[in-house]
């Protein structure tokens, strides 16, 4: 079995680690700007410049049985053309929906899945109108290329709009109600080619400057009842999209209700805890799903916490806790850059949530 991954970052790296025991070999399509250091030694690296035809890419990747993605920012026409040569999972139309916040939120709304209130804008007048409708504060986001809190502006007052107008070029943006959430949660689900489905338990997430910093599972009491609601939304989405692979859904919890913020058509940072916290990790189950193998057990083995390493250098020696596992991505350390994560599982002597708090202070204060 051979898999071609569009992308060459840490998600591709962790998929490759999970795929070795399943007997899968790998090829990675890397854009030169990204480099391919995380996946060095894990398979064939194909440098792409965007001019390749699907056939050229398919052949350069060693004619894989399946092609998948590790990011949503991919060339959709190319992905569609690749379907002539092999299975592409998830399908390009599903990736297309998640590439653009307007398409994504509209898709959710059309399926009756709640999101925050939003309006589209292409001018300051449109933004003013949206604020009239939604009320202050709002958060303005670019429709594409905005992740990890990038290309987002929080507007609380008329003065903020005036300030925003100084650098706004009239590009299409989404204006969202800035909600006061009780917390943020996500759920990772997998659907196989045969249509079998599996769901990981809800994860509680904290973001810092729009970037995921920690995940905890089980989630706090205020979220526990929402597991079945999240599963319900993901079921609807995956069936409608004829989705194959792992799909991640990030949500806000507001007044005890789930509001979906974002979908990711791939393995997701808030599912990294599954590497140590579950029998089968999200990476393994993504591979199982796209190669149509039986899905692995998604039950949580034990309470687990995850701390992202954002621009901080850490080795296993810095984390002297029996049940803490440091995952390092082989990237150079730059401020704010995701360079690794630590998973901490519960044992008789380790409370993962306490350790999480301690490590967060150790690395970030
Ligand atoms: P996003 O890029 O949409 O995933 O947003 C990154 C983070 O910014 C989220 O995880 C939230 O912490 C925060 N955020 C984004 N949109 C909203 C919103 N409409 N209301 C409140 N917080 C938000």
Image (cartoon, helix red, strand yellow):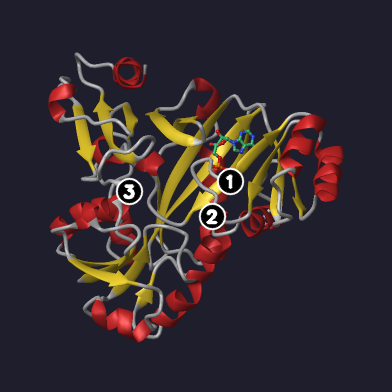
Q: Are marks 2 and 1 in contact (CB under 8 Å)?
A: yes
Q: Residue 296: where, in percent of width, then height?
A: 28, 51
> Closer to the camera: disc 3 or disc 1?
1
Which residue was labeled with disc 2?
A: 145
Q: Are marks 3 and 1 in contact (CB under 8 Å)?
A: no
Q: Residues within 10 Å of mark 2 (few under 14, many from 20)?
A: some
Question: Could you say which quadrant of the image residue 48 lies in?
Answer: bottom left
**As drawn, is 130 to the left or to the right of 19?**
right
Residue at disc 2, secondary structure: loop
Above or below, 217 relative to 348: below
Q: Residue at x 34, y 80 (%)?
A: 86
What whole-number distance in Å separates the C-alpha atoms at marks 2 and 3?
Answer: 24 Å
What whole-number distance in Å separates the C-alpha atoms at marks 2 and 1?
Answer: 8 Å
Which numbered disc, 2 or 1, marks the residue that appears first in the sequence? 2
Question: Could you say which quadrant of the image residue 273 lies in?
Answer: top left
**As drawn, is 134 to the left or to the right of 231?**
right
Q: In which quadrant of this rendering is ligand 1 seen?
A: top right
Q: Residue at x 58, y 56 (%)?
A: 144
What whole-number distance in Å separates the C-alpha atoms at marks 3 and 1?
Answer: 28 Å
Q: Is mark 1 within 8 Å of ligand 1?
A: no
Above or below, 300 relative to 51: above
Nearer to us in this view, 208 or 349:
208
Nearer to us in this view, 346 or 47:
47
Which residue was labeled with disc 1?
A: 151
Q: Residues within 10 Å of mark 3 (few under 14, many from 20)?
A: many
Mark seen at residue 11? none
Q: Residue 256: where, in percent of width, then height?
A: 63, 28
**As drawn, is 329 to the left or to the right of 176?**
left
Residue 201 seen in render:
yes
Which residue was labeled with disc 3?
A: 282
Nearer to us in this view, 291 or 172:
172
């Amino acid at each position: 079995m051979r898999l071609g991954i569009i992308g060459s970052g840490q998600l591709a790296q962790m998929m490759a680690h999970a795929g070795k025991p399943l007997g899968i070999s790998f090829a990675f399509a890397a854009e030169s700007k990204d480099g391919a250091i995380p996946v060095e030694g894990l398979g064939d690296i194909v440098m792409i410049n965007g001019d390749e035809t699907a056939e050229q890419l398919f052949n350069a990747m060693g004619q894989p049985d399946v092609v998948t993605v590790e990011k949503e920012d991919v060339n959709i026409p190319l992905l569609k053309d690749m379907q002539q040569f092999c299975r592409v999972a998830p399908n390009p139309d599903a990736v297309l929906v998640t590439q653009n916040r307007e398409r994504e939120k509209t898709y959710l709304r059309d399926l009756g899945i709640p999101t925050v209130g939003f309006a589209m804008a292409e001018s300051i007048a449109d933004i003013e109108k949206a604020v009239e409708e939604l009320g202050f504060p709002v958060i303005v986001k670019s429709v594409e290329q905005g992740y990890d809190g990038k290309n987002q502006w929080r507007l609380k007052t008329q003065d903020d709009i005036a300030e925003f107008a100084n650098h706004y070029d009239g590009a299409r943006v989404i204006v969202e109600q800035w909600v006061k959430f009780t917390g943020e949660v996500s759920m990772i689900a997998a659907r196989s080619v045969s249509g079998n489905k599996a769901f990981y338990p809800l994860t509680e997430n904290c973001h810092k400057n729009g970037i995921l910093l920690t995940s905890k599972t089980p989630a706090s009491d205020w979220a526990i009842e929402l597991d079945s609601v999240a599963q319900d939304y993901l079921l609807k989405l995956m069936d409608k999209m004829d989705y194959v692979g792992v799909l991640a859904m990030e949500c806000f919890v507001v007044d005890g209700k789930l509001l979906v913020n974002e979908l990711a058509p791939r393995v997701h940072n808030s599912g990294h805890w599954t590497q140590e916290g579950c029998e089968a990790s999200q990476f393994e189950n993504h591979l199982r799903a796209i190669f149509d193998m039986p899905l692995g057990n998604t039950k949580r083995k034990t309470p687990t916490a995850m701390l992202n390493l954002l621009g901080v250098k850490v080795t296993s020696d810095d984390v002297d806790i029996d049940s803490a596992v440091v995952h390092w991505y082989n990237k150079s350390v730059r401020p704010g850059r995701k360079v690794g994560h630590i998973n901490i599982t519960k044992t008789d002597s380790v409370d993962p949530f306490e350790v999480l708090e301690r490590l967060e202070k150790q690395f970030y204060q």
